[in-house]
Image: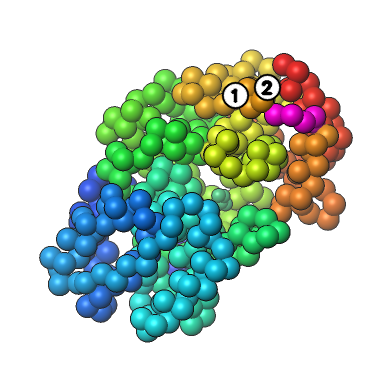
């Protein structure tokens, strides 16, 4: 088992990465259970696939489970979903010193984390992420949020979990497309800050996606360690260090917006193509060698993630995509910070990017 510390002053916690952590949840999370029953929030799929194992482990330790089940999908991350969850936790008389468990993907973790951030001004929670994307990204670092009519993740809080159990066995039942979408966030850590990890993934990405145990554990543990380092350095995204995690997200957000935040393009797929565009835009500005940008594109295309803009079949031009970026929540005093590359493994925050230039670049990419 890999145990990765997230070294936050005053509230450090651990991320455990191994198979069968859910089946051993009682032992793993004993320190965070102080009553005879525990509140578990789960999406319906996560409960169907993993609920019985979690319940059996806790039952063997004399602990019962009260389930709050969420319908699968982003819809749960809403004001209505938040109200229903908070009311349910209040009815159960969850106290500040208690821990609520979140079993599922990013939607479950984000909603549960935010409910726990505001319940009685803050109670504890334990993340049990069951998707690759949640294991390597959203369950670690304390960003919690819901979506509103104005956009995604616009209402939320920083609220760190007390423990993260990343059970690699949970990925056995994850659809291949979702596994690939999560892999985009894995390779992101290589592209943004770790050239050796990028090279390793270029050679072993297929093994990771095939869930070969050693490759998968190395990929998840290395990704979590990278995220833990960044979060410990810049928990609230104020120094620029954590902003590097947004590599590919500004381009990706525009693509997600243009495709209606639908199944046409999953978030991770948008990030994957967004990273290719960030690399190619960096090459266009003379920041990296075109060959390095193409290495990024190749590593993404090889595993079946989108790496070419025309393949999305969009009916729009670059200006329309750049317009989506104007509504990005990272917009800061009229400029949009972009994460660009000085090399593979060397991302930086650029504040001098003109959206008109990005639009011209996107026109070229659409015609590629
Ligand atoms: N997912 C980006 C972050 O946690 O900062």
- Nearer the observer, 167 or 160: 167
- Bounds of the magenta segment: 314-318
Inspect the magenta stretch and tell me whether residue 316 lies in it. yes
- Residue identifier under label 2: 310
Q: Is residue 348 left or right of residue 225?
A: right
Asked if ligand 1 lies within 8 A of label 2, the reply is no
Q: Is residue 286 visible?
A: no
Instruction: Decide: is 334 above or below 272.
Output: below
- Nearer the observer, 268 or 331: 268
Q: What residue is drawn where x is 29% and y is 30%?
A: 212
Q: Position of residue 114 (x, y in %)?
A: 52, 67
Crowding at mark 2 (Cα within 10 Å: few <14, some 14-19, many 20+):
few
Q: Is residue 59 visible?
A: yes
Instruction: Decide: is 276 above or below 354.
Output: above
Q: Secondary structure at mark 2?
A: helix
Q: What residue is drawn where x is 49% and y is 36%?
A: 181
Crowding at mark 1 (Cα within 10 Å: few <14, some 14-19, many 20+):
many
Asked if ligand 1 lies within 8 A of label 1, the reply is no
Q: Position of residue 143 (x, y in %)?
A: 54, 59
- Residue identifier under label 1: 307
Q: Is residue 181 left or right of residue 333?
A: left
Q: Position of residue 175 (x, y in %)?
A: 38, 36
**Quadrant where the C terminus is found in the figure:** top right
Q: Secondary structure at mark 1?
A: loop
Count of number-bearing discs: 2
Inspect the magenta stretch and tell me whether residue 263 lies in it. no
């Amino acid at each position: 088992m890999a145990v990765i510390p997230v070294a936050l002053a005053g509230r450090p916690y651990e991320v455990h990465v191994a198979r069968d952590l859910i089946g051993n949840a009682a032992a793993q999370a004993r320190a965070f259970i102080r009553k005879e029953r525990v509140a578990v929030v789960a999406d319906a799929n996560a409960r169907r696939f993993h609920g019985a194992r979690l319940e059996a482990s806790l039952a063997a330790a004399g602990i019962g489970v009260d389930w709050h089940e969420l319908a699968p999908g982003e819809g749960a991350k809403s004001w209505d979903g938040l109200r229903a969850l908070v009311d349910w936790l209040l009815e159960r008389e969850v106290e500040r010193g208690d821990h609520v468990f979140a079993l599922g993907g990013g939607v479950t973790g984000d909603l549960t984390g935010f409910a726990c951030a505001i319940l009685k001004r803050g109670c504890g929670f334990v993340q049990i992420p069951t998707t690759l994307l949640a294991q390597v990204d959203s369950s670690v670092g304390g960003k919690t949020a819901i979506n509103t009519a104005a956009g995604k993740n616009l209402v939320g809080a920083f609220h760190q979990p007390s423990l993260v159990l990343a059970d690699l066995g949970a990925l056995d039942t994850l659809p291949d497309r979702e596994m690939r979408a999560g892999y985009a966030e894995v390779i992101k850590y290589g592209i943004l800050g770790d050239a050796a990890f990028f090279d390793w993934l270029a050679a072993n990405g297929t093994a990771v996606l095939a869930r070969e145990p050693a490759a998968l554990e190395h990929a998840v543990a290395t990704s979590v360690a990278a995220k833990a380092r960044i979060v410990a350095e810049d928990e609230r995204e104020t120094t620029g260090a954590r902003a590097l995690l947004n590599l590919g997200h500004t381009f990706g957000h525009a693509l997600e917006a243009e495709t209606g935040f639908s199944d046409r393009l999953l978030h991770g797929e948008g990030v994957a193509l967004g990273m290719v565009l960030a690399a190619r835009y960096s090459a266009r500005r003379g920041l990296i060698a075109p060959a390095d940008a193409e290495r990024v594109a190749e590593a993404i295309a090889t595993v079946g993630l989108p790496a070419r803009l025309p393949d999305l079949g969009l009916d729009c031009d670059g200006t329309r995509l750049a317009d989506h970026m104007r509504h990005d929540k990272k917009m800061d005093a009229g400029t949009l910070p972009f994460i660009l590359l000085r090399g593979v493994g060397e991302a930086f925050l650029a504040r001098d990017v003109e959206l008109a230039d990005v639009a011209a670049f996107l026109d070229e990419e659409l015609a590629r």
